Every structure is written in C-alpha cells, then in structure tokens.
Image: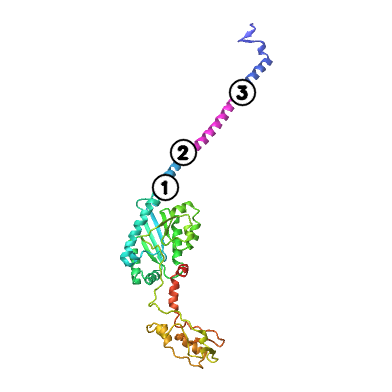
Amino acid sequence: MSSSMNGTTMDDGTIPALWRRYEQLKNVELRKDLLIEELLARYEYLSEQHKNECADHEREREYNRTSQRKDKDLQQNILRLHNILNRDPFVLVLVDGDAMIFQDALLQEAEAGGKKAAGLLQSAVMSFLESAVAELPSDTKVVTRIYANLRGLSDVCAKAGIVDNPSKAEGFMRGFTRGRTLFDFVDVGYGKDRADGKMTEVFKLHLYDYRCRQILFGCSHDNGYARLLEELSIDEECRNRVTLIGGVPLEKELADLSFKKTRFQTLFRTTKINTHQQPEFVSDFRPVTYDTNAFPSTLNQTSGLVTPQSTNVSSTVTSSEWPSLATGTWAAAAKNAPPFVPGQSTLSAAKIIAQKSSAPTQIPRNRKGQRIDPSLKGIYDKDEIARIKRMKMCNVHYLHA
C-alpha cells in the first residue's frame, strides 16, 4: 500500500495531526469571523455617519433656503425703509418771534408784507442750504415755526412806531402763515418762556429725525438757549445738523458755541426795538435855586409842615422866565394848588400834595421834620404795569443802553 493517500502521508492521519489541522482551520474561521464582524461594525459606523451627514446637509439646505428668503425680505425692507426715510425730506426753521423781529418795511405792509416775508425766507433758506448742506435732495421742503406772543408783539411794534396800528402787525403774522403752506406764525399767548419751551421741545423732537436734514435755530437774543445747545456742541453729528440764525448780534454764550451761524439781514432786524416813547411836550424848565438863608422856617406842630416865616424869597429865576404850560399838566396843577391852611392834620396835607403838586415855597414834612413824598395813588396803573411785564423786555438793553 502506498505510503501516501490523496497527497497526505500516513503521519497526517494520526490523531495529533488531525487535531493540528482542525486547529488551523478553526483559526482561519475565527479570523474570518473577526473580519466579517469588523466589516459589519465599520459599515454600521459609516451608515450612522452617513445618516448624520445627510441630516446635517438637509438642515443646511433648509437653513440656506430660509436665509435666502430672509435675505430677500430684508433687502425689500431696506429698500422700503430707504424710500420712507428719503420721502419728504425737510429742513426746520425755528424762530423766537418775540426777539427776532422782521424788518420794519415788511411789518408796515401788513398781510401783504407777511406773504412777502414768507417768500423771502423760503428763498434765503434754500440759498443757504445749497452751500452749507451736502447731498441735499432736490425736493427738500422748508418747514418754519415762529413762536411769539402775537398781541404783545403787535403792541410793542405799535408803541415803537414801527406800525401805526397793532392790527397791521397782526395782519403781517396772518399773511406770513398764509404765504406758505408749511409756514406757521404760532401765538403762544402771554407768559414767561412760553416761546422758549415750545422751541426747545420741537427742537429735541426733530434733532435726530433722519428726514429733517437741517435745523435753523433763531435765538440770538437769549443766553437761556445756550444751556440746551452747549450739551450738543460736543457731538459732531449735532453740530452738522444745527445752524444758528442771527438777527440782533448773538449773545456771547451763543456766539462761543461751535455751531454754524448765518444771518438773513434783509429779513430780520439787526437792532432791538426801542419802545421808549417821546414826551408829548418838551419842557423849558431850568433848575431853580433858592437862597436857603431867605427861608427861616419853623415846624408847625399841628400840620407837620415846615412853613417859611418871610415872603421875601430870592430866586435865580423870576416869574417872567417861567414858560406857559398847557392846562392839565403837573405844573399847572401846582400853580392852582390852594394855599396851606395851618391846623390841618399831616394826613390831610399829604393827601392834598398827592392830588396837586405843592408850591415851591412849601415842603411837606412830618412831626419829625422828615420830608413827605406825594402818594402814587391814582398815578400807578396796575394793569399797565402788568401789560409791560408780559412783554418780557430786556432789562440790560433798556436800563443800561
């Protein structure tokens, strides 16, 4: 019998050899199983990763779609807002009408002068803006608000002789309002700082309004506006958006602020109104001096008046040198005053002096020899004083000028 069968030897047929061959096959199967398990694990991992990537991709794609829709909507909103912001651009002119007064010639033309002033102001503002404001839209409108006490301002103009009747000044204000549809002459009525308060609030309202391309602020007479403006002078955007209008010269605190400044001299007065009235007559009286030695006088203990003991009075002015006066003047009243009657009470004497000026030869005094001044009763007009106070006249101008 051959020593080999089917390519194997007899030794391979032994039990140990068979076991070795089995172990070899077993190891091969084990490696095969491990390989298959590894491949399955890797496939499972890659499948999960693919699934996640697909989900992420779907989210990204959906996000891109949403972003594109939002971007398109935002672009449309920006375009719409841009159109809204650039619609009806305007410049705002705010004027304190109690201090910045129009030229006399315009006021004297009443309503026609008001319409003319509105047209001139429109032209002056547009001419200024062409050189002072960059990229100003061609359809920019001019909105003007002038705040003033109409009745008080009319009375002042009449009192100063600018107009012969307050109704002309009132007509001017009506004409100004009617001259342009966006021009208003606003009556704030009587009261201190009413125009200031309205101007300040309207100024704040429009300062950061994009459609308001420039604010022309007419407040040259009042340092009170400096408190409002000095806080804004450090902001470059505000400095570029605000221009101060001068009528009368700017007060020092306003002039020192770093805002643009301009003046419309053909429209507004450059000097303050003088309301001092001329007297109805000019007196030719000259100072009268008396020789005090010619007045040996005694104090009347009953009446409280010092009366001269002698009628011989030496004066540097004789009776022929005194000019004649119209009936009803204080001098005429003094001339016709009744003589002093000894024995009257101090109160009675003072009352007579209050009603009629005393003669130069009598000086009313009380029991202590102190001079008694005439009472102002009947002279002091409370209503007139109240009316003058409501005009808010400048004390510095009228008392120091």
For the question of whether residue 293 can be seen, the reply is yes
Please name the residue that numbered disc 3 is placed on: 31
For the question of whether residue 88 can be seen, the reply is no
Tell me which numbered mark, 1 or 2, is placed earlier along the sequence. 2
Numbered disc in front, either 1 or 3: 1
Q: CA distance from mark 1 to mark 3?
A: 68 Å
Residue 160, relative to residue 359: is it above or below? above
- Nearer-the-camera pick, 113 or 27: 113
Describe the element under mark 1 as helix, strand or loop.
helix
| Residue type at tag 3 | Arg
Q: Are marks 1 and 3 in contact (CB under 8 Å)?
A: no
Q: Position of residue 221 (x, y in %)?
A: 45, 63
| Residue type at tag 1 | Ile
Highlighted range, magenta:
30-57
The crowd level at tag 3 (other Cα within 10 Å; few <14, some 14-19, many 20+) is few
Please name the residue that numbered disc 2 is placed on: 61
Q: Are marks 1 and 2 in contact (CB under 8 Å)?
A: no
Report if residue 41 lies within the magenta region: yes
Please name the residue that numbered disc 1 is placed on: 78
- Nearer-the-camera pick, 8 or 132: 132
